[in-house]
Image: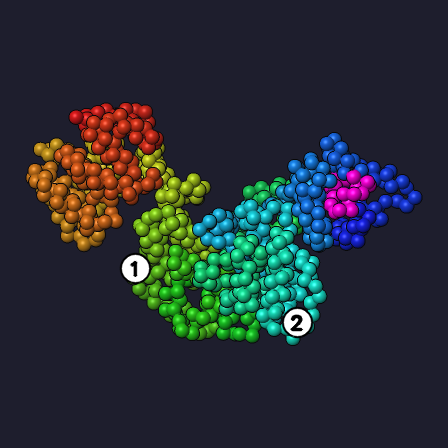
Amino acid sequence: MIKCFLSHSSKDKDFVRTVASGLRKEIRIFDEQTFEKGMSPAEEIINGLDDTTLFVLFLSDSALNSEWVKKEIRLAKTKVDEGRIQRIYPIIIDNIDYTDERIPLWMKDGFNIQPIKKAKVAVRKINARLREIAFNTHPTLKERQKIYVGRNDKTTNVEQRFDDFDKPTPIVFVASGLNHIGRKSFIKNALSKSSAIRDSYEFPVIQMETTDSIEDFILKVDDLGLADVGEIKNLMTTSISDKIDISLRLIESIIEEKERILIEDKGSIIQSDSSVVSWFVDIVDRIKSSEHLTFCIASQFRGNKSFSNRNPEYYFEEIPELNIHERRGLLKRYSEFKGLELNREDLKFISELLSGYPEQVLFAVDSISDTSLFAVKKDPHLIREYADDKARVVIESFAKDEKKLSFLYFLAKFEFISYEFLFSLVDEKEFYPTTQAFINMSVCDQLGVNNDYIRVNQVVQDYISRSRFGTSSEYDSILDKHIRKFISEYSDDNRDLSEYIFSIQEAIKSGQDIDNRILVPSYFVKTIKSLYVKGGSSNYKEAVKLADRVLDNSQYMHESVIEHILFMKCQSLARLHDKDFFGAVRKIKEPESSFLHGFYFRVTRQRKRAIDSYMRVLERRPNDQRAKGELVLLYLQNDEYELALGLAKSVYERQKNNPINANNYLNCLFYKDKNNVDKGVVEEIIEKLKSNPAQRSQEIYCSAKAKALAKFDNRVEEAFEVIEKGILDFPDIKYPVLTLCDLSIQYRKLDKLEYAIGVLEQTDSPKSQTYSSFIRYKATYLALTNRLDEGIQLCKQKLRELTSQELEQLFEKLGQYQR
């Protein structure tokens, strides 16, 4: 067993006795409590040190003058060197200095000796050292404590905030969410990962009830014993300013001890309207210059983000329930820790019982460990009820407000719902304040890039669903009217995602005969597509998050809806070059899986693998126009124009109104000798593009027109005027710039090529689709300006996806450009 020897002077016995009383009796070695009467003190010291793991030395003037203490120090040092004592922990308990010449040199050099003059602080520090030793001696103890899964984005936010030197260090860190959702665990894990606290650190904790105020705060902080401000009395007759002064004296002592207080707040500090109570603001305002994280608050209510933006000494994070992937991760890790061998099907069965509380996962695994997997499978309701009991508390908090309760049941019908759709069904003026109250209480949270969607916390939603709480007849009538109208007007492409998903679910469940086209999630795809088309990693990531939210609870969705959502998710992951793509795509059936693999390899510029993937699609589905279109792009990138031409023509003739198909076919024709091209076909395609008012058609028309003027009519200067105007008309589109590069190289307009490369240099990144083209154009410019070696080196560094053979072909082409 780990033992702790308390070495001290007899004059310091009262202080050490108080410390000893705060340690577990069976681990402490303290003379008057553990040394046997009648035994020689020297013999007992030796026996005690033989059993010691941690040697705590209470340094004081009297201790440094004590022969007994000196002897204990010498013996302890010998046993540490022999490996029989794991650690020495010296602390100063009176007014001596760590430089005191009586302190052994090896101790001064090897330890950060700090003064600790409060017994309760000493107890906490000693317990922390004991915990560190226990972690080292019994690694499973640390492993158990460090089993923490999920909230990775939130944890990263905390790390970034604490590493942001452009902002002051937070004084107050608030994690809000439902009770038992893991707020305190999140705080500790995030701060540990941020290196703000050690893994072994344990917070001093106080609870603040809804009705508590500054008087309760003072008494509870004082009761921690971390500060000594003398006797506190007559608080009810003390002015608020004097109470703040008392609070400050308490808190300043805590800051001096480098401690932090964890507050379990039930609405006293962060109030139900998300504001911070004024007396706490006054306290924080007067200690913020310390730049010491002092308060960590596990709050029932969300803090107001606009307040923290104005006051950077506050940092707020909302903690949602564990999503389905986080639940599965925690279930797997904890079951492995407990030595359980659960197969994939067992893990899947248990995970489907979980709602999102971390404690529910631990309860499920402990139940299997304590009884058996068979017993848990026989009575799975016990695991569900664990979460239901906690969700019931949330529901019962609205028991006296039937209007709010009914509205919550109504919101719980939706996986998520946009504010726009919601307030087309109910009165915004009446119900918007209620939605905000639900958000402040963490009963609901918001989704979307601009928080456009609201959803009920899944723990609460699952409980409502299983309890079969119905909506009032008023809401039933609203929904029935909406669904009937939706079915009769399904061709309206302007409906938003949440409306579509909900309406499809309800129509399917009611067994109504619906046109197959209504099952294609066009509205969902439209919403995701809008993020996807905007481009940029933040929009792609948001598209993935939105898809995951729906897929996590897809049991009531039609198969076609799920397939479309998965497809869009995989495309977004591919755009991000995210390796999670390969896990997600496994859920897609062939040949769609091969198509998506091809897409991933194309956007990551692995052209050979992309071509192989698309060929697999055509083996299964010979007329797949999408795969043919993708192959056209790849063949064009490989300068394999003859291979591209036949496919491009085939795809174009099947869908002549698609501007992408038209563009690909034209590019194939532009690379042929003009004497072998039917100019009438080129003019027909260009006119079709011109007549299409869509921006994409107009941008492609601009490039096509410029190329045609130069190639077929030899009107080169006019071609440059057209494309340069296109660059001005479409400043956010890169393709006119690429066309300018092509024309500039073809007609040796080096000034125009230099300009175009400069534009691409400002906008391209290694993950962008045009990056490879940009590098080739830049290398060509270098070759044209007699810097071939620089161009070759640039390609070697930046075009690592090319094979050695492909690079040699590129270098040969570059050599032809050199003057």
Sequence-wise, which precedes: disc 2 or disc 1? 2
Image side of residue 650 versus residue 796, left or right? left
Determine the secondary structure under disc 2.
helix
Tell me where residue 463 appears, x and y as whole percent. Answer: 55, 62
Q: Secondary structure at mark 1?
A: loop
Q: Residue sitting at 71 percent across and 40 percent down?
A: 101
What kind of residue is marked 2? Leu
Q: Is residue 285 visible?
A: yes
Provide the residue span drawn in magenta: 51-70
User: Residue 280: where, in percent of width, then height?
Assistant: 56, 65
Q: Quick one: quadrant of the N terminus?
A: top right
Tag 2 residue: 235
| Residue 69 part of the magenta-drawn span | yes
Quarter of the view holding residue 570: top left
Depth check: give the residue in front, 673 or 709.
709
Horizontally, residue 189 falls left or right of residue 570, namely right
User: Residue 643 at what x, y percent from top left?
Assistant: 23, 32
Mark whose residue sits in front, 2 or 1:
2
Tell me if residue 673 comes above or below residue 409 in the rendering. above
66 w.r.t. 225: above or below: above
Query: Considering depth in this image, is 442 or 676 the residue closer to the camera?
Result: 442
> Crowdedness of circle 2 by 10 Å Cα count: few (<14), some, many (20+)?
some
Give the spatial CA distance, label 2 vs label 1: 65 Å
